[in-house]
Image (cartoon, rainbow, N blue to C red):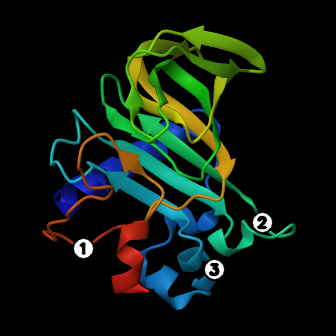
Amino acid sequence: MKRSRINDILRESDAFIRSFGYALPPFAHQSPEALSASDHAEIKARRMGWDITDYGAGRFDEMGLVLFTTRNGRTSDLGKTRGMLYAEKIMISRENQLSPMHRHDVKVEDIINRGGGTLVIELYQADAAGEIDRLRDVTVQVDGTARTLPAGGHLKLAPGESVTLYPDNWHAFWGEGGNVLIGEVSTVNDDLTDNIFEHPIGRFSRIEEDTPPVHLLVSDYDRWL
């Protein structure tokens, strides 16, 4: 993706998030220079902040996602009885924009429709080897109530509804009837190692630097901070 396109998406996304009365933390709006000059060590270590991805495919309008990680623990805390063992994100899935089929090895997550259109989630159960089971029904908790779907079934969440997904739940999702503001509350989030995709694709965008960034992405931190 061109950096100029990412900058446009950041501005559009910030306006969309604000339209629902959701306020991002102050560092979301800092310039790269201001963030670099601040006490950013924990932001970088916890990989908090903006993430605009086209999954390396270069087709953001068809396959992509906007994410902002507002808080995140450390993976080193997961084996302890104390520590920050949770994470939170706000995301935008555009109408008919696919977030491709994947699962996690560690993360348990609540996916919440915070407003906008309908969030459609395609679901499969993992087999004993962790691969997609295309025959077995899938049972998930939707706001505390069990919901069973056939393999590949589409769970539709209206604004205010949520689903809990476990590591053995393969899932893909997109917006229907409009863009969707999505909340995610989960176990510690590790986007570097804990995303298993159905097909070999990238987790982050390859960026063409045609203009300076207005805000840094988490994938920029190692080069900028």
Q: Is residue 18 above or below residue 56?
A: above
Residue 46 in the image: state x and y as whole percent: 59, 72
Q: In this view, does 163 lie above or below 16?
A: above
Residue 94 seen in the current view: yes
Element type at marker 3? helix
Relative horizontal placement of residue 78, taking residue 29 as reference (left or right) = right
Quadrant in which the C terminus is drawn: bottom left
**Given the current orientation, which residue lies at the most extreme right position?**
81
Q: Is the residue marked by circle 3 packed among few (<14), some (14-19), or many (20+) residues within 10 Å?
A: few
Query: Closer to the camera, 19 or 112?
Result: 112
Q: In this view, does 19 lie above or below 212?
A: above
Q: In which quarter of the image is residue 189?
A: bottom right
Residue 2 in the image: state x and y as whole percent: 16, 59
Please, what is the three-letter code of the amino acid marked with disc 2? Met
Quadrant in which the N terminus is drawn: bottom left
Q: Is the residue marked by circle 1 packed among few (<14), some (14-19), or many (20+) residues within 10 Å?
A: few
- Dot 3 and dot 2 residues touching (CB under 8 Å): no
Q: In which quarter of the image is residue 96?
A: top left
Please, what is the three-letter code of the amino acid marked with disc 3? Glu
Element type at marker 1? loop
Relative horizontal placement of residue 18, taking residue 214 as reference (left or right) = right
**Disc nearer the start of the sequence (2/1):** 2
Query: Closer to the camera, 53 or 106?
Result: 106
Please, what is the three-letter code of the amino acid marked with disc 1? Pro
Please tell me the numbered disc located at residue 42: 3
Q: To which residue does mark 2 refer?
A: 84
Q: To which residue does mark 1 refer?
A: 212
Q: In whole angstroms, how far apart are the C-alphas of marks 3 and 1?
A: 24 Å
Q: Residue at x 50, y 80 (%)?
A: 35
Q: In whole angstroms, how far apart are the C-alphas of marks 3 and 2?
A: 13 Å
